[in-house]
Amino acid sequence: MTAGSAFLSWGEVDNWLGGLADLEQLRGAARSRFVRKEQPVQQVLERVGAWPYPLPMLHLVGSKGKGSTALYCEQLSRRAGLRTGLYQSPHLVDRRERILLDGKPASWSWWAEALAALSAAILEEGLSRFEAETAVAFWIFLRADVDVVICEAGVGGVGDATAAVPAQLVCLTSVEREHTDLLGDDIAGIALQKAGVVGEQGVLAVGPLPQDAMRAILGLCRERGARCLEVGVDVSVVETEPTSEGTWVTIEAGERGARTQHRFFLSAFGAHQPYMAALAILATKTFFRQILGRAWSWSWLESLGEVSLPGRLQQLGGIEQTILLDTAHTPRSIRASLEACRLHKHQDPACILLGLSEDKAVIDILSLAASVCRILLLVPTPGPRGCSMELLEEVAKVDLPVILEIYPDVESGLVAFQQHLLPQELGLITGSFRLAGAVLAGLGGL
């Protein structure tokens, strides 16, 4: 691979990046070597004169909820009239989804211009694809002169490529045992690894956390003189009213003796979404007032109902059938998806299509799905870490109280899914981002 002086199409950009090591395609020790103590992304930015990085940044870390919280923060910032740059991962259909300018994917020409400037340094520093794309995002945001960068971490926090640029405010959404091969198995340790990106005298906003994680976070903040803001203390969710189209949310905020309530609508499904929205409100309000020195208006909350969350309990299908598309891929997140079906649609899914990764708790997830549906369909998940047909056939031998069928690919599984789902029934497709992306790309006519 050589540094490119010019890229003439998105295909050329994508092919060049595709020649780099891809963390999302690797396993075990091969993945862990790209969770670093040093920051090669910073070195690349220094080489092209983009350091110290001058733009204010809000950094989102956490096990679950980063994507939706980032989109809520981005929406509130745009509603306030700011030009925004949002870096998120993974993507669903097109990698250009990862870098947004004012809510829209940056054009391929932005990517091409960035790589023309950065490719030599990327190769010299030995960046992975995710690291390279992180550098590209920071470069694009700088050249586009955005007012605020909203950056979603990949895996972890400390050692993640996104930590190359110090953030003025860090937002910790949640903490679970995940990516234990990289982050360890201790919940407090995982919390510290994620929140460790907060700087001395910094600001950390946190969502609902397990007690062990919260104790560790408070200790970290005391050590660094950082201010810790909490959902449930500084902003509280006082009422939620689920509907078939979303949730009405009432929050309470303000200083003691002067707290006010504010009601708004979310078009997203799931019991956790009001808390992610509350965290986004807390983080964005603090960021505006303390970091940017700007005014804040509670009227902006009305715009949160416009936020679309592709692949996150996204409603598909027509009038006769209701189909929800989700990216849940752990027992806990699958359970939350099933609870959301009851909360908003008042029924369990009659048919579930699962595409799972081999490194997940496959049997536990199958058992959860089989406990509520009448037909369970399994397909190999696209990508190197997806369950193979051989593994699916092996797990299918488990005694489950459900009709279970296996299909060799996503397309044939979707066809069967649509055929099995009766009028007025609810169907759920979940298991991975790659499966959701395949569906959104148009497979099966959905």
Image (spheres, helix red, strand yellow):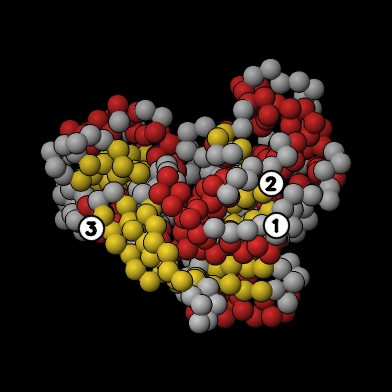
Q: How far apart are marks 2 and 1 (CA)?
A: 9 Å
Q: Disc 2 on helix, strand or loop?
A: loop
Q: Residue at 39% of width from left, 33% of height from top?
A: 440
Q: Where is residue 30 in the image (x, y as percent from the top left)?
A: 64, 49
Examine the rendering and report whether any part of residue 226 can be seen: yes
Query: Which residue corresponds to mark 3?
Result: 342
The residue indicated by pointer 2 is 147
Q: Position of residue 340 (x, y in %)?
A: 29, 57
**Residue 231 to residue 59: above or below:** below
Q: Residue placed at 28% from the left, 33% from the top?
A: 414
Looking at this rendering, what residue extends furthest in the left direction? 423
- Across and down, in percent, residue 400 comes to 20, 55
Q: Residue at x 79, y 49 (%)?
A: 53
Considering the numbered disc 1 on the image, is that residue within a helix, a strand or a loop?
A: helix
The N terminus appears in which quarter of the rendering? top right
Give the number of the disc on residue 292. Answer: 1
Q: Quadrant of residue 78?
A: top right
Three-letter residue code for mark 3: Arg
User: What's under tag 1, amino acid-wise?
Assistant: Leu
Nearest the viewer among 128 and 389 is: 128
Q: How crowded is mark 1: few (under 14 residues within 10 Å), some or many (20 or more)?
A: few
Label 2 or label 1, whichever comes before in sequence order:
2
Residue 197's disc number: none
Residue 359 in view in this figure = no
Could you give the CA–CA distance between mark 3 and mark 2, rounded to whole angstroms? 40 Å
The answer to the question of whether label 2 and label 1 lie on touching residues, with beta carbons closer than 8 A, is yes
Of circles 3 and 1, which is in front? Answer: 1
